[in-house]
Amino acid sequence: MLTHLVELTVSNASAVEFYDFMINPGDERYSEWWPGEHLQFHIVKRGGESHIGDIVFMDEYLGKGRRLRGFAIVVAAERPQQITWQMKKAGLRLPIFVTLGINDSPAGLQVSHELRIGYSGLGKLLDPLIKIYFNKSYRAALKEHCEIEWPRLAEMLNKSR
């Protein structure tokens, strides 16, 4: 299994506001967050009251030449600290998980964006194939994207107050 972690501190932000925005997405506000980069993010099918089981659709660019587009299901949601989405394709759950960890601290909002791809056990044999797609330039683009988008979200939410 491959893991990519981006951690940063965002000033003037709160875990509750970030969580509420990310757990109940809408296309208009998502696009407002980062025009031209963030295209769509909305709930397609609602799960339980805690949002576990929500199916979402997400469409965004990740720098130049990379577009992330697809469905995911919320597999964990702990307000306001964490949300985990598992990617889906053709109705099947893929071995791709995105976890957003958010915690208030005296230094600012601690944001942790973790991407886990691959299988454990015998499935690890496929990791070299996954690395072809999830290569060094992809990881660098994801890191840069996170470092830009989370402070932008704080800025947007602060303007909405």
Image (spheres, grey):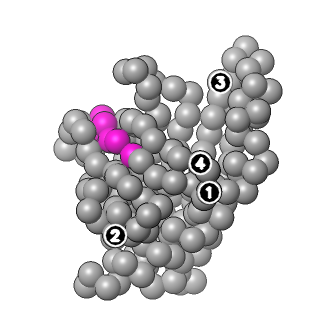
The image shows residue 80 at horizontal and vertical percentages of 37, 61
Q: Is residue 101 magenta?
A: no
Q: Which badge, 1 or 3, comes first in the chain's sequence?
A: 1
Residue assigned mark 3 = 119
Label drawn at residue 64: 1
Seen from this angle, which residue lies furthest front? 65
C-beta proximity under 8 Å, tags 1 and 2: no
Label drawn at residue 32: 2
**What is the crowding at mark 4: few (fewer than 14 residues within 10 Å), some, or many (at least 20)?**
few
Q: Circle 3 — which element?
A: loop
Residue at 70% across, 48% down? 138
Is 71 placed left or right of 95 in the picture?
Answer: left
- The span from disc 3 to disc 4 (Cα, nearest Å) is 24 Å
Q: Amino acid at mark 1?
A: Lys
Q: Which badge, 2 or 4, comes first in the chain's sequence?
A: 2
Residue 29 sits above or below residue 49 on the image: below
Residue assigned mark 4 = 66
- The span from disc 1 to disc 2 (Cα, nearest Å) is 19 Å
**What is the crowding at mark 3: few (fewer than 14 residues within 10 Å), some, or many (at least 20)?**
some
C-beta proximity under 8 Å, tags 2 and 3: no
C-beta proximity under 8 Å, tags 1 and 4: yes
- The span from disc 2 to disc 4 (Cα, nearest Å) is 20 Å
